Protein backbone atom coordinates (compact mmCIF):
# COMPACT_ATOMS: atom_id res chain seq x y z
CA UNK A 1 0.00 0.00 0.00
CA UNK A 2 1.58 3.32 -1.07
CA UNK A 3 1.56 6.48 1.03
CA UNK A 4 -0.73 9.31 -0.05
CA UNK A 5 0.65 11.79 2.50
CA UNK A 6 4.26 12.00 3.67
CA UNK A 7 5.25 14.30 6.54
CA UNK A 8 9.00 14.63 7.16
CA UNK A 9 10.39 16.29 10.30
CA UNK A 10 8.04 19.27 10.33
CA UNK A 11 7.98 21.98 12.97
CA UNK A 12 5.61 24.92 13.25
CA UNK A 13 5.42 27.90 15.62
CA UNK A 14 2.76 30.41 16.60
CA UNK A 15 4.17 33.88 17.21
CA UNK A 16 3.29 35.53 20.53
CA UNK A 17 5.07 38.77 19.62
CA UNK A 18 8.12 39.89 17.66
CA UNK A 19 10.47 38.02 19.97
CA UNK A 20 8.53 35.00 21.22
CA UNK A 21 6.91 32.00 19.57
CA UNK A 22 5.44 28.79 20.92
CA UNK A 23 6.01 25.46 19.16
CA UNK A 24 2.87 23.70 17.92
CA UNK A 25 4.61 20.91 16.00
CA UNK A 26 8.05 19.65 16.92
CA UNK A 27 10.07 17.62 14.39
CA UNK A 28 7.04 15.46 13.54
CA UNK A 29 7.08 12.73 10.89
CA UNK A 30 4.35 10.39 9.66
CA UNK A 31 2.89 8.79 6.56
CA UNK A 32 -0.73 8.06 5.67
CA UNK A 33 -1.42 5.19 3.30
CA UNK A 34 -4.05 5.29 0.57
CA UNK A 35 -7.38 4.00 1.85
CA UNK A 36 -6.33 4.16 5.49
CA UNK A 37 -8.61 5.44 8.25
CA UNK A 38 -6.34 7.27 10.70
CA UNK A 39 -7.60 8.89 13.89
CA UNK A 40 -5.47 11.49 15.69
CA UNK A 41 -6.07 12.04 19.41
CA UNK A 42 -4.37 14.18 22.01
CA UNK A 43 -5.01 16.65 24.80
CA UNK A 44 -5.82 20.29 24.06
CA UNK A 45 -2.73 22.05 22.76
CA UNK A 46 -1.05 18.85 21.57
CA UNK A 47 -0.96 20.07 17.94
CA UNK A 48 -3.78 18.01 16.40
CA UNK A 49 -5.51 20.83 14.51
CA UNK A 50 -2.21 22.37 13.45
CA UNK A 51 -1.21 19.04 11.95
CA UNK A 52 -4.57 18.76 10.14
CA UNK A 53 -4.04 22.15 8.48
CA UNK A 54 -0.64 21.05 7.20
CA UNK A 55 -2.19 18.14 5.30
CA UNK A 56 -3.85 20.32 2.65
CA UNK A 57 -1.50 23.31 2.64
CA UNK A 58 -3.64 25.63 4.77
CA UNK A 59 -0.42 25.87 6.76
CA UNK A 60 3.13 25.15 5.61
CA UNK A 61 5.85 24.06 8.03
CA UNK A 62 8.55 26.34 9.36
CA UNK A 63 10.98 23.47 8.87
CA UNK A 64 10.54 20.08 7.25
CA UNK A 65 8.37 19.04 4.29
CA UNK A 66 4.91 17.67 3.54
CA UNK A 67 4.06 15.82 0.31
CA UNK A 68 0.51 15.06 -0.84
CA UNK A 69 0.43 12.53 -3.65
CA UNK A 70 3.95 13.60 -4.56
CA UNK A 71 3.16 17.35 -4.47
CA UNK A 72 5.16 19.51 -2.05
CA UNK A 73 2.79 21.68 0.01
CA UNK A 74 5.26 24.55 0.34
CA UNK A 75 5.24 25.16 -3.44
CA UNK A 76 2.58 27.83 -4.11
CA UNK A 77 1.71 26.42 -7.54
CA UNK A 78 0.70 23.11 -5.91
CA UNK A 79 -1.79 24.46 -3.37
CA UNK A 80 -5.02 24.33 -5.38
CA UNK A 81 -4.32 20.84 -6.68
CA UNK A 82 -3.45 19.67 -3.16
CA UNK A 83 -6.71 21.12 -1.83
CA UNK A 84 -8.63 19.35 -4.56
CA UNK A 85 -7.06 16.05 -3.54
CA UNK A 86 -7.38 16.63 0.23
CA UNK A 87 -10.75 17.98 1.37
CA UNK A 88 -11.22 19.54 4.82
CA UNK A 89 -14.24 19.30 7.11
CA UNK A 90 -14.22 21.53 10.21
CA UNK A 91 -16.02 21.64 13.57
CA UNK A 92 -18.83 23.98 12.61
CA UNK A 93 -20.69 22.97 9.43
CA UNK A 94 -22.36 26.40 9.25
CA UNK A 95 -18.95 27.84 8.32
CA UNK A 96 -18.84 25.64 5.19
CA UNK A 97 -22.44 26.08 4.01
CA UNK A 98 -22.76 28.94 1.51
CA UNK A 99 -25.92 28.39 -0.59
CA UNK A 100 -29.67 28.58 -0.04
CA UNK A 101 -30.50 24.99 -0.99
CA UNK A 102 -28.78 21.68 -0.30
CA UNK A 103 -28.06 20.88 -3.95
CA UNK A 104 -26.70 24.37 -4.66
CA UNK A 105 -24.36 24.10 -1.71
CA UNK A 106 -22.89 20.82 -2.93
CA UNK A 107 -22.55 22.25 -6.45
CA UNK A 108 -20.79 25.43 -5.28
CA UNK A 109 -17.24 24.08 -5.35
CA UNK A 110 -17.77 22.25 -8.63
CA UNK A 111 -19.01 25.41 -10.34
CA UNK A 112 -15.91 27.26 -9.12
CA UNK A 113 -13.80 24.56 -10.74
CA UNK A 114 -15.66 24.97 -14.03
CA UNK A 115 -17.10 21.44 -14.01
CA UNK A 116 -19.71 21.11 -16.84
CA UNK A 117 -23.36 21.30 -15.67
CA UNK A 118 -24.20 17.72 -16.69
CA UNK A 119 -21.25 16.34 -14.71
CA UNK A 120 -22.02 18.68 -11.81
CA UNK A 121 -25.55 17.28 -11.61
CA UNK A 122 -24.18 13.75 -11.61
CA UNK A 123 -21.64 14.47 -8.86
CA UNK A 124 -24.13 16.38 -6.70
CA UNK A 125 -26.65 13.54 -6.87
CA UNK A 126 -23.97 10.97 -6.13
CA UNK A 127 -22.56 12.89 -3.15
CA UNK A 128 -26.00 13.47 -1.61
CA UNK A 129 -26.88 9.82 -2.09
CA UNK A 130 -23.62 8.79 -0.44
CA UNK A 131 -24.31 10.85 2.71
CA UNK A 132 -28.01 9.97 2.82
CA UNK A 133 -29.39 13.42 1.96
CA UNK A 134 -30.89 12.69 -1.46
CA UNK A 135 -34.38 13.43 -0.14
CA UNK A 136 -33.33 16.94 0.94
CA UNK A 137 -32.13 18.24 -2.43
CA UNK A 138 -34.22 21.44 -2.41
CA UNK A 139 -34.30 21.98 1.35
CA UNK A 140 -32.79 25.06 2.94
CA UNK A 141 -29.58 24.08 4.78
CA UNK A 142 -30.47 26.11 7.88
CA UNK A 143 -33.49 23.85 8.45
CA UNK A 144 -31.34 20.70 8.69
CA UNK A 145 -30.27 19.14 11.97
CA UNK A 146 -26.67 19.46 13.16
CA UNK A 147 -25.78 15.97 11.93
CA UNK A 148 -27.43 16.62 8.57
CA UNK A 149 -25.54 19.90 8.19
CA UNK A 150 -22.23 18.17 8.82
CA UNK A 151 -23.14 15.45 6.31
CA UNK A 152 -23.95 18.23 3.83
CA UNK A 153 -20.52 19.75 4.43
CA UNK A 154 -18.99 16.33 3.78
CA UNK A 155 -21.05 15.96 0.58
CA UNK A 156 -19.70 19.28 -0.67
CA UNK A 157 -16.17 17.98 -0.21
CA UNK A 158 -16.89 14.51 -1.61
CA UNK A 159 -18.41 15.99 -4.80
CA UNK A 160 -14.94 17.35 -5.56
CA UNK A 161 -13.76 13.71 -5.63
CA UNK A 162 -10.81 14.09 -3.23
CA UNK A 163 -8.37 11.28 -2.53
CA UNK A 164 -8.39 12.13 1.18
CA UNK A 165 -10.82 13.59 3.69
CA UNK A 166 -9.32 15.42 6.69
CA UNK A 167 -11.83 16.04 9.47
CA UNK A 168 -10.91 18.41 12.30
CA UNK A 169 -13.19 17.68 15.29
CA UNK A 170 -16.22 17.19 12.98
CA UNK A 171 -18.58 15.95 15.71
CA UNK A 172 -17.77 18.39 18.50
CA UNK A 173 -20.95 20.44 18.01
CA UNK A 174 -23.27 17.46 17.44
CA UNK A 175 -25.55 15.48 19.72
CA UNK A 176 -25.02 11.68 20.01
CA UNK A 177 -27.39 10.95 17.13
CA UNK A 178 -25.67 13.46 14.86
CA UNK A 179 -22.26 12.06 15.80
CA UNK A 180 -23.40 8.55 14.92
CA UNK A 181 -24.78 9.71 11.55
CA UNK A 182 -21.55 11.46 10.57
CA UNK A 183 -19.23 8.67 11.72
CA UNK A 184 -21.27 6.02 9.93
CA UNK A 185 -21.23 8.07 6.73
CA UNK A 186 -17.47 8.60 6.82
CA UNK A 187 -16.67 4.99 7.66
CA UNK A 188 -18.82 3.77 4.75
CA UNK A 189 -17.06 6.17 2.35
CA UNK A 190 -13.73 4.83 3.54
CA UNK A 191 -14.74 1.19 3.12
CA UNK A 192 -16.81 1.42 -0.05
CA UNK A 193 -14.99 4.15 -1.97
CA UNK A 194 -11.49 3.71 -0.56
CA UNK A 195 -11.29 7.37 0.45
CA UNK A 196 -8.39 8.00 2.82
CA UNK A 197 -9.55 9.55 6.10
CA UNK A 198 -7.59 11.51 8.71
CA UNK A 199 -9.91 12.19 11.62
CA UNK A 200 -8.92 14.58 14.43
CA UNK A 201 -11.01 14.08 17.57
CA UNK A 202 -11.09 14.38 21.35
CA UNK A 203 -13.80 11.70 21.63
CA UNK A 204 -11.87 8.56 22.46
CA UNK A 205 -14.75 6.30 21.37
CA UNK A 206 -14.36 7.60 17.80
CA UNK A 207 -10.80 6.30 17.71
CA UNK A 208 -12.09 2.73 18.03
CA UNK A 209 -13.24 2.97 14.37
CA UNK A 210 -9.73 3.57 13.07
CA UNK A 211 -7.27 1.38 11.26
CA UNK A 212 -4.55 3.30 13.10
CA UNK A 213 -4.56 5.70 16.04
CA UNK A 214 -1.95 8.45 16.47
CA UNK A 215 -1.54 9.89 19.97
CA UNK A 216 -0.07 13.39 20.04
CA UNK A 217 1.67 15.19 22.89
CA UNK A 218 3.46 18.55 22.75
CA UNK A 219 3.63 18.61 18.95
CA UNK A 220 4.99 15.08 18.60
CA UNK A 221 3.56 11.61 18.04
CA UNK A 222 3.83 9.96 21.45
CA UNK A 223 2.36 6.61 20.38
CA UNK A 224 0.68 4.97 17.42
CA UNK A 225 -0.88 1.65 16.56
CA UNK A 226 -4.15 -0.16 15.99
CA UNK A 227 -6.95 0.64 18.48
CA UNK A 228 -6.23 -2.61 20.32
CA UNK A 229 -2.62 -1.50 20.82
CA UNK A 230 -3.57 1.94 22.11
CA UNK A 231 -6.58 1.02 24.26
CA UNK A 232 -6.22 -2.71 24.92
CA UNK A 233 -2.57 -2.89 25.91
CA UNK A 234 -0.37 -1.42 28.61
CA UNK A 235 -0.12 2.13 27.22
CA UNK A 236 -0.87 4.65 29.98
CA UNK A 237 -2.99 7.44 28.51
CA UNK A 238 -3.49 9.47 31.68
CA UNK A 239 0.04 10.98 31.64
CA UNK A 240 -0.78 12.16 28.09
CA UNK A 241 -3.90 13.97 29.34
CA UNK A 242 -6.27 11.36 27.91
CA UNK A 243 -8.70 8.78 29.22
CA UNK A 244 -9.47 5.50 27.48
CA UNK A 245 -13.06 4.84 26.35
CA UNK A 246 -15.38 3.29 28.94
CA UNK A 247 -15.40 -0.31 27.65
CA UNK A 248 -11.59 -0.68 27.30
CA UNK A 249 -11.24 0.89 30.78
CA UNK A 250 -13.68 -1.63 32.22
CA UNK A 251 -11.94 -4.49 30.41
CA UNK A 252 -8.61 -3.43 31.90
CA UNK A 253 -10.10 -3.36 35.42
CA UNK A 254 -11.54 -6.84 34.92
CA UNK A 255 -8.17 -8.15 33.72
CA UNK A 256 -6.53 -6.58 36.77
CA UNK A 257 -9.08 -8.44 38.89
CA UNK A 258 -7.99 -11.75 37.44
CA UNK A 259 -10.52 -12.35 34.66
CA UNK A 260 -9.31 -13.58 31.29
CA UNK A 261 -10.53 -10.70 29.11
CA UNK A 262 -8.94 -10.49 25.64
CA UNK A 263 -7.17 -7.29 24.65
CA UNK A 264 -9.49 -6.76 21.67
CA UNK A 265 -12.61 -6.51 23.89
CA UNK A 266 -13.01 -2.84 23.01
CA UNK A 267 -16.79 -2.70 22.54
CA UNK A 268 -19.84 -3.91 24.44
CA UNK A 269 -20.45 -6.92 22.22
CA UNK A 270 -16.93 -8.33 22.54
CA UNK A 271 -16.80 -7.67 26.28
CA UNK A 272 -20.16 -9.39 26.85
CA UNK A 273 -19.01 -12.38 24.77
CA UNK A 274 -15.82 -12.63 26.81
CA UNK A 275 -17.70 -12.49 30.10
CA UNK A 276 -20.21 -15.10 28.98
Image (cartoon, rainbow, N blue to C red):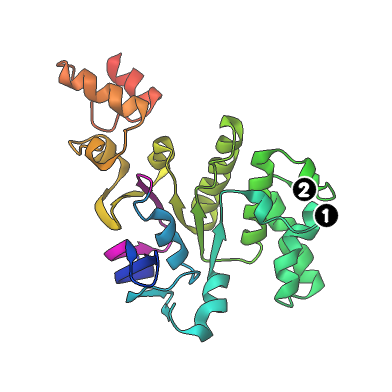
Q: Where is residue 187 in the image (x, y as percent from the top left)?
A: 51, 46
Position in image of residue 264 (x %, y %): 28, 33
Is residue 209 shown above or below 55? above
Q: Please indicate, yes or no, whether residue 2 appears anywhere in the rendered image.
A: no
Of residues 223 and 63, which is closer to you in this image? 63
Residue 88 appears anywhere in the view? yes
Q: In which quarter of the image is the N terminus?
A: bottom left
As drawn, is 76 to the left or to the right of 92? Answer: left
Mark nearer the N terminus (2 vs 1): 1
Q: What residue would you read off at disc 2?
A: 141
Kindly give the residue lying farthest to the right in the view shown: 138
Quadrant of res 49: bottom left
For the point 51% across and 53% down, the residue is: 167
Coordinates of residue 117 in the picture (x, y in percent): 81, 71
Residue 202 appears in which quarter of the rendering?
Answer: top left
Give, as a single range, the part of the protein colored magenta: 24-44
Element under disc 1: loop
Q: Is residue 225 within the magenta segment? A: no
- 132 to the left or right of 29: right
- The residue under label 1 is 100
Q: Are marks 2 and 1 in contact (CB under 8 Å)?
A: yes
The picture places residue 109, in percent across and down from the top left corner, at 70, 67
Disc 2/disc 1 C-alpha distance (Å): 7 Å
Q: Residues within 10 Å of mark 1 (few under 14, many from 20)?
A: few
Amino acid sequence: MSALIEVHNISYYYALDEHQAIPALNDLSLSVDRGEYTVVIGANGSGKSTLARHLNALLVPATGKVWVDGLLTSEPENKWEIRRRVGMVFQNPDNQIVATTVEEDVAFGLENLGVPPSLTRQRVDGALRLVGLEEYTTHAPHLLSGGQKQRLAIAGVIAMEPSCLVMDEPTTMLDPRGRKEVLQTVREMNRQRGITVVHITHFMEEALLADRVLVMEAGRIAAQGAPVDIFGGDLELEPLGLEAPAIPRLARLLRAGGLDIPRDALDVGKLVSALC
